[in-house]
Amino acid sequence: MAAAEELFSLYDACRLCPRLCGANRNAGKTGYCGMTASLTAARAALHMWEEPCISGSAGSGTVFFSGCSLQCIFCQNRTISAGRSGKEISKDRLADIFLELEDKGALNINLVTGAHYIPHIIYALDRAKKQGLRIPVLYNSSGYERVETLKLLEGYVDIYLPDFKYMDPDLAGKFSGARDYPEAAKSAICEMVRQTGPCIFDPEGKILRGTLVRHLILPMHTKDSLRVVEYLLKTYGGQIYISLMNQYTPPDQPLPAPELNRRVTDREYEKVLSKALELGLVNGFFQEGKTAEESLIPAFDNEGV
């Protein structure tokens, strides 16, 4: 536990994410993520709507952390990413939550947007594993990560589930205020793949280890989506799985980027999917039908926290 405890000093001048804001979160200051060093989570429950190899029929033991260092203007989890939802818990309570999710039959522990709480996560995983936690640990990320921070997770995370949102720095700047996103995501995914190696599945198709990269297609920006897919295939080939998503849902309030005020069309999605298959995508997941019209976003009501 000593090594994990020492990590909490990282909150003194927080540089856990690429924003490098330097906030003294231990002193109650909020970082770019919007959070202090107090651990806050909005939901801990079985989640059925991840990729089939992650959720299976039993569900993924998903912990949604409050706050986010990226703050995309179109975020579908905006109530928690902006820190408006969630309950403050202790690091020991987090360890108990992991064990409770395993007892409920979760296939894995799914840590959603936890970069700004990595010291807490490492402490809780150490404690839970000493008490018998055995299921794989999955790190569910925006892709906007520091390699130095990811290295702290080596040996703790079995499965990485990052987004690769943009290849174009202008889009990253416009929609997420992070022109450095493409380079940060490239470096982060490289480190994730280094840690996990190729994807490994059990006989029933459940993922045990590896990196699965998600890409959410945005309206009017299929060219950038194709650049993302091409980069991932050329760089990693069959080492990773790629999940192409059509579930973009515009927020209730109109966005300053007019093209984001509608859903992705079937034609846009099919254009990206067809090109991906043409480029040789074999290891992938696709969404069929009107996924964007389905409720894939749970209620952030502090269930299980």
Image (cartoon, rainbow, N blue to C red):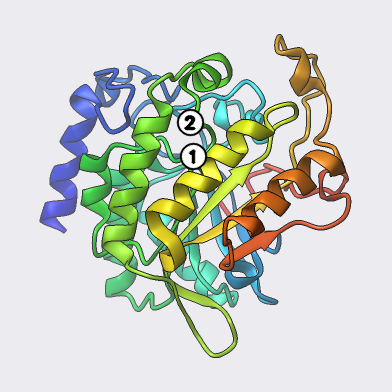
Q: In the rendered view of the protein, which quadrant contains the N terminus?
A: bottom left
Disc 2 from disc 1: Cα separation: 9 Å
Residue 272 appears left or right of 106: right
Q: Position of residue 77 (x, y in %)?
A: 65, 35
Q: Count neighbours of disc 1 (C-alpha within 10 A) and say few if under 14, some if 14 to 19, many if 20 or more.
A: many
* Amino acid type indicated by mark 2: Cys
When the figure is inspected, residue 30 is found, relative to residue 99, above or below; the finding is above
Residue 164 visible in the snapshot: yes
Residue 291's spot in the image, x, y percent? Answer: 82, 50
Task: Answer left or right for 268 relative to 25.
Answer: right
Q: Residues within 10 Å of mark 2 (few under 14, many from 20)?
A: many
Name the foreground residue: 199 vs 64: 199
Q: Is residue 5 above or below residue 177?
A: below
Q: In the figure, 283 relative to 245: above or below?
A: below
Give the foreground label among 2 and 1. 1
Please state which of residues 81 and 288 is positioned toward the viewer in this rendering. Answer: 288
User: Which secondary structure lies at badge 1?
Assistant: loop
Residue situated furthest front in the rendering: 278
Q: Looking at this view, name the residue that lies furthest to the bottom.
A: 203
Q: Residue at x 27, y 61 (%)?
A: 195
Q: How many numbered marks have been drawn onto this rendered protein structure?
A: 2
Give the residue at x 48% y 54%.
233
**Left or right position of 260 against 189:** right
**Relative depth, front residue between 9 and 148:** 148
| Residue that badge 2 annotates | 68
The foreground one among 181 and 100 is 181
Residues at circles 2 and 1 in contact by the CB criterion of under 8 Å: yes
At label 1, the amino acid type is: Ser
| Residue name at image x 57 percent, y 24 percent | 72
Which comes sooner in the sequence, label 2 or label 1?
Answer: 2
Mark 1, residue position: 142
